[in-house]
Image (cartoon, rainbow, N blue to C red):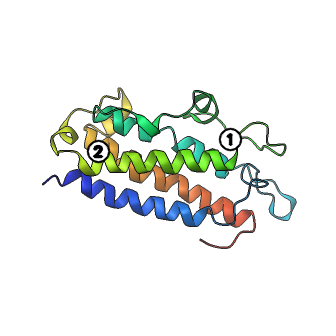
Amino acid sequence: MPRIGTIIAAGAKLGQMYAERLLEGVKQENYARFAAPGGAVVKSNHAAFVLGHLSLYPIRTMQCLNLPVGPTQFPASYEALFKFGVECQDDPDGRIYPPLAELRAMFFDAYKAAIAAIESAADEPFDAVNPAEGRLRELLPTVGAALNFYLIGHVQVHLGQLSAWRRAMGLPPA
């Protein structure tokens, strides 16, 4: 019975449950806004950016496991909006980012597919060399290490940003 994928999936599922809680109370009107507690604008990643950015990564699970990308395939427009190094923007008029419902669906559908894929994967693919190059391969040398990071560590880092954004927006703890 494969074990590595089920171990990674367990942590990844916790992240998805946390994301559900963090999105409670987030509305279309505020999901892409910078918080401004006391009138001071806080330029931090908001819900739109966090969901969109994280939606770029489940496809890597499918690619590393040589599976069809299916629901992990994100719209082409997401790359320019959410890739590593792109700055989060305040979107008061709702013209920059996709609607909240679209981002939620993309995020949860993509991670559900990626988690299902790793749960059913044999252990052998996780020992393969990480196909990324440079520093990322140096830090995460195997497919297992990379997918563990993409599905758990990376998600939790950005969910921490979402948690801080929630509080700055005046929303209760999740």
Mark 1 falls on what kind of element? loop
Badge 1: how crowded within 10 Å, few (<14), some, or many (20+)?
A: many
Q: Nearer the viewer, residue 103 or 96?
A: 103
Spot occupied by residue 28 in the image (x, y as percentages of width and height):
75, 53
**Which amino acid type is marked by label 2?**
Ala
Q: Which of 89 and 106 is in front in this view?
A: 106
Q: In this view, does 26 lie above or below 158?
A: below
- Cα distance between the residues tagged 2 and 1: 28 Å
Mark 2 falls on what kind of element? helix
Badge 2: how crowded within 10 Å, few (<14), some, or many (20+)?
A: some
**Which amino acid type is marked by label 1?**
Cys
Q: Residue at x 28, y 33 (%)?
A: 130
**In the image: residue 13, left or right of residue 169:** left
**In the image: residue 149, left or right of residue 72:** left
Disc 1: which residue: 88
Q: Residue at x 42, y 51 (%)?
A: 112
Residue 45 seen in the figure: no
Spot occupied by residue 25 in the image (x, y as percentages of width and height):
69, 66
Residue 150 seen in the figure: yes
**In the image: residue 141, left or right of residue 71:** left
